[in-house]
Image: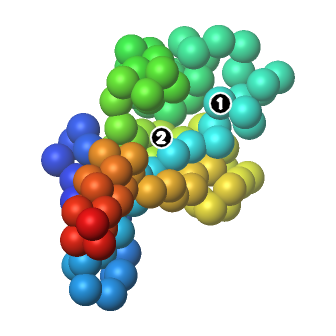
Amino acid sequence: MVLTNGIYMAIMLPSGESGGIAMIVRTRIFELCDGRYHNLSELAMAMGISVSQIYRVREGKRRINQKFIVGAIKAFPEHRLEELFYLVPEPEKQAIEEKEKVAVLG
């Protein structure tokens, strides 16, 4: 299941009794743009989004949304989706789940 409200995108993967593992979407576009786009302004123009959104995603201050994904596909049409994006466990939810396991075991 994908949850999105324009700012946040996460994916819940099935996982036993816990109801799922929260995953967040990360991108490789900043590594791929070296040599192709000289600055964030050029990248933003190619993606059709604001420079501030790209900057915030790069700095980890904003999560990737649908508009960012569509823009990345436009800016890097020679790359497959799985080359542009990948999933990692959501740190906050993962930390809470670990604390709950310790509390149950303790």
Between marks 1 and 2 in the image, the one whose residue lies nearer the viewer: 1
Residue at image coords 43%, 28%: 60
Which mark is on residue 78?
none
User: In the shown orientation, is residue 97 left or right of residue 91?
Assistant: left
Q: Position of residue 24 (x, y in %)?
A: 40, 52
> Disc 2 marks which amino acid?
Gly
Kindly state the secondary structure of the residue where label 1 is placed: helix
> Disc 1 marks which amino acid?
Phe
Q: Of label 1 and label 2, which has the lower sequence position?
A: 1
Q: Quadrant of the C terminus?
A: bottom left
Q: Which of 75/97 is in front?
A: 97
Residue at image coords 25%, 86%: 17
Q: Quadrant of the N terminus?
A: bottom left
Which mark is on residue 30?
1
Which mark is on residue 71?
2
How many labels were placed on the picture? 2
Q: Which quadrant would residue 15 be assigned to in this image?
A: bottom left
Scheme of colours in the image: rainbow
Q: Is residue 7 visible?
A: yes
Residue at image coords 57%, 52%: 85
Q: Is residue 12 visible?
A: no
Bin the neighbour count of mark 2 within 10 Å (Cα to Cα): few under 14, some 14-19, many 20 and up.
Answer: some
User: In the shown orientation, is residue 39 left or right of residue 56?
Assistant: right
Q: Is residue 82 above or below residue 55?
A: below
Verify CB contact (< 8 Å) between mark 1 and mark 2. Answer: no
Q: Among all residues in the image, which is located at the extreme front?
A: 106
Residue at image coords 48%, 40%: 71
Q: Position of residue 42 (x, y in %)?
A: 60, 17
